[in-house]
Image (cartoon, rainbow, N blue to C red):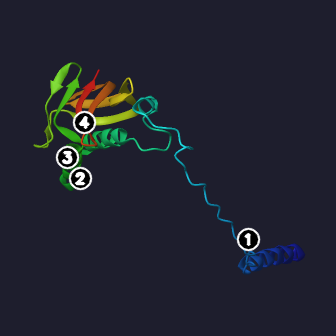
Amino acid sequence: MIRMTLLAMLILVSAAARAEEPKAALPDAPAAKIVEAPKATPEAAPARTPDSEAKAPAAKAGESRAYVDTAITFLKALTHSSRPGEEGELAWAAARANAADAVTLTVGGKNVALDLAGKKSDARLVRFHKLSTLRDGAAVKGVTLESLEVRMGSEAYSGKATVHMDEKDGKWLVTAVEVE
C-alpha cells in the first residue's frame, strides 16, 4: 500500500516538474518570399460599361451592404428607444440618423404615429429576424423581414415586414415600415 502511494506521488511530482520546465524555443521559420502581383494593364482588365455594371450583382460575398447596416441600425434603435435615460436618448438619435425626415409605420393596415424628432411613438418594436434584400430588378428598394413584432398599447402584432429605403447623397435612409 505504501509502495503504491509512493509511486503515485512520484508520478504526480514528475508530471508537475515537467510542466514547469521551460520549453525549447522553436527554430526560426524560414523567411517567406514576398511575391509581387503582376501589375494590371488596361488590356488585362475587361472593359466596364454601364450595361456590364448594371448586370453585375450589387454586392459580392464579403462586401458591405450599407442598406442592410442602415436597416439593422434603425430597427435596433427603435427596439431600444423605450429604454429610460441615456440609452433611450441614444437609441432615438440613432433612429433619426438612419431615417428620412418622415417615416411611415403601418401595422395591420393602420398608420401609427412615429415621431423621431419628438422621440415619441404609439408603437414599440419588440423584436425582428431574418432580413433579406428587397429589389426591383437590380435596384435595391429596402429589406424584408420574415418576422417583426410590434406592441401598441396592450396589443401585440407580428408578421412579415417590409422596410422601404431610399438612397440620398450616398446614404441609405429608412422611409417606411410596413407590417402585415
Position of residue 143 relative to residue 64, above or below, is above
Q: Nearer the viewer, mark 1 or mark 2?
A: 1
Q: Which residue is mark 2?
A: 87
The answer for how far apart the CA atoms under marks 2 and 4 are is 21 Å
Q: Position of residue 39 (x, y in %)?
A: 57, 54
Question: Which amino acid is tagged 4?
Answer: Val
Q: Which mark is residue 126?
A: none
Secondary structure category for the residue under label 2:
helix
Could you say which is closer to the camera, residue 140 or residue 100?
140
**Sequence order check, earlier mark of 2 and 4:** 2
Question: Which amino acid is tagged 1?
Answer: Pro
Q: Is residue 146 in sight in this rendering? A: no
**Sequence order check, earlier mark of 4 and 3:** 3
Q: Nearer the viewer, mark 1 or mark 4?
A: 1
Asked where in the image residue 153 lies, by quadrant, the reply is top left
The answer for how far apart the CA atoms under marks 1 and 3 are is 55 Å
Secondary structure category for the residue under label 3:
helix
Q: Which residue is mark 3?
A: 92
Q: Position of residue 173 (x, y in %)?
A: 25, 38
Q: Which mark is residue 174?
A: 4
Position of residue 172 relative to residue 162, above or below, is below
Q: Residue furthest top?
A: 109
The answer for how far apart the CA atoms under marks 1 and 2 are is 52 Å
Question: What residue sits 89% from the left and 76% below the top?
Answer: 3
Q: Which residue is mark 1?
A: 30
How many residues crowd around disc 3 within 10 Å: few (fewer than 14), some, or many (20 or more)? many
Q: Position of residue 15 (x, y in %)?
A: 78, 74
Marks 1/2 in contact by CB < 8 Å: the verdict is no
Secondary structure category for the residue under label 4:
strand
Question: What residue sits 35% from the left and 34% below the top?
Answer: 128
